[in-house]
Amino acid sequence: MRKNKSLVKNSALVISAILAIGGFVSWNSHHSTPKIITRAAVDVGSGGLKVTVAKIDPLSQKIHKIVYSKEHSVPLKRDMQVGGKSKFSKEIRATALTTLANLQAELAPHKPEEWTGIATAASRQAKNGQKMYDQIEKELGMRISIISQQEEGRLGFTTAAAVSGVPQEQLISFDSGSGSFQLTTKIGDELEVIEGELGHIPSLEVLMNIRGKTLDFSTPPEPVTLEEAKILVEEMRSKLPSLSEAFREKLKNPKTVVVGIGNENFIFAMGATAVGKNTYTKQELWTAIEQHAGKSAAEMHKFSKPHESVLGMVLLYTIMDGLEIDQLTYSYANGSCEGLLVDTNYWTPKK
C-alpha cells in the first residue's frame, strides 16, 4: 500500500514537473519571440515627403528591417515663397495629397498596420497647414502632426541614436533641412535643443541678396564662387543662435560625437561626398569648398543635387564654424522617419 502511495506521489511529481516545464517552454517561447509589426512613417519637410516603411519589434521598440525608404519632392517652402503668402497653394496641397495616396497604394503589399507622420518648418509657417493635414487624415486615414522645433530636435536625437549607435550620453544630433536646423543633446537627464532658422532656402535668399537678384525657383542659380562663399559665411553667421554654456562644454568634451542625419540630399551627405569620408573636420570641409566652388553642375555629377551642393556645404561650414563644431559624422537617415518609427508617442497602443 505504501509502495502504491509512493508511486502515485512520484507520478504526480513527474506530471507536475512536465506541466511546469511545458508551461515554462510555452511562456519562454511566447516572450522570446517578439511579434513583428509593420509601420509606415512620414516626415513632411520643407522640400519633400520622406517615407519609410519598416518591420518593428514593438516590445523593444527597435527597427527589425526597413523595407522601403525614399524622399519624394513636394516643395512646400518654395510654394509659399513663390506665392508670396504664408499659406500653401491649392496646387501644392493637391500634390501632397496625391503623392501620399499613390504611396499608400504602392506600399500596400507591405501591409503597414498604421501610417503616421510629422510635419515641420514649412507646415509650422503655413496658415492653412493644419487644414491640409485634416484633409489628408479624412481621405487617407493618415494622421500627420505639425510639430514644434523642440519636438523636431527630440525626434532628430532619437533618429541619430538609432542609426549611428552612439550612446545617447555622448551624442549631439544635428538635423538640417530646407527651412531650419536643430542641434540636440542630453544635459543631465534633460534634452536641450538649439533651434536655428538657417536652412537651404534661407541660405539661397542670402546668396540672391549678395548677387542683387530676386529669388527665382524656376532657374537653378549660377555656381557659387569661392569669393561668394566667403561672403556667405560672414552674412549667415549673424543668423546663428547662441549656445548655453552647458552645450558649449558638451561640444568640447572629447567623448562627444556630433552626428549629422539625413539622406543623400542633405548637407551632411554633400560634405561627406566632397571630402570622401563620413567623418570629417570643419577644415576638411572648407578645403572641399575651395576645390568645388565655381564648378558647373556637369562637373558636380557625383552629388545628388549638383546645383545645390556648394551652397549646402557653405551652409554646413557656417554652422560648424559659428557654433565651434570641429568635427561631425554623417549617418544616413530618411529625415526623422527612423526615430518616428520607434517613438511610442505617435502610434496607436496595441491591445
Image (tube, helix red, strand yellow):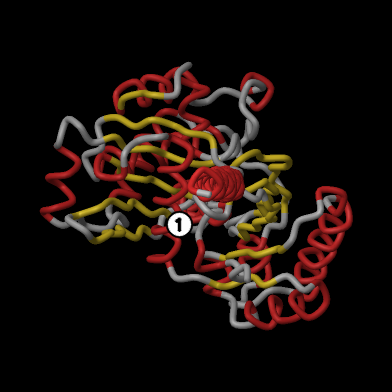
Position of 161 with respect to 240 (left or right) is right
On the picture, is 326 further left or further right than 72? Answer: left
Q: Is residue 24 visible?
A: yes
In this view, the residue in front, 278 or 58, is 58
| Residue at the outermost front position | 1
Residue 221 pos. (x, y %): 61, 41
Amino acid on which disc 1 is placed: Leu
88 w.r.t. 81: above or below: below
Instruction: Pinpoint residue 184: horizontal percent, then vertical percent.
Output: 32, 53
Q: What crowding class fits label 1: few (fewer than 14 Cα within 10 Å), some (14-19), or many (20 or more)?
A: many
Q: Position of residue 182 (x, y in %)?
A: 38, 54
Residue visible at 70% across and 43% down? 70
Residue 275 is drawn in which quadrant?
top left
* Nearer to the camera, 185 or 311: 185
Element assignment for label 1: helix
Residue 244 location (% of width, % of height): 15, 57
Give the residue pinned by disc 1. 155
The residue lying at 44 percent from left, 70 percent from top is 148
Q: In this view, does 297 lie above or below 187?
A: above
**Rendered-image quadrant of the C terminus:** bottom right
For the residue pair 117 and 86, the one nearer the viewer reads as: 117
Say if 273 sits above or below 187 in the image. Answer: above
Q: In this rendering, would 215 be left or right of 173?
A: right
Residue occupying the point 48% across, 56% down: 202
Q: How many labels does the image show?
A: 1
Say whether residue 31 is visible: no
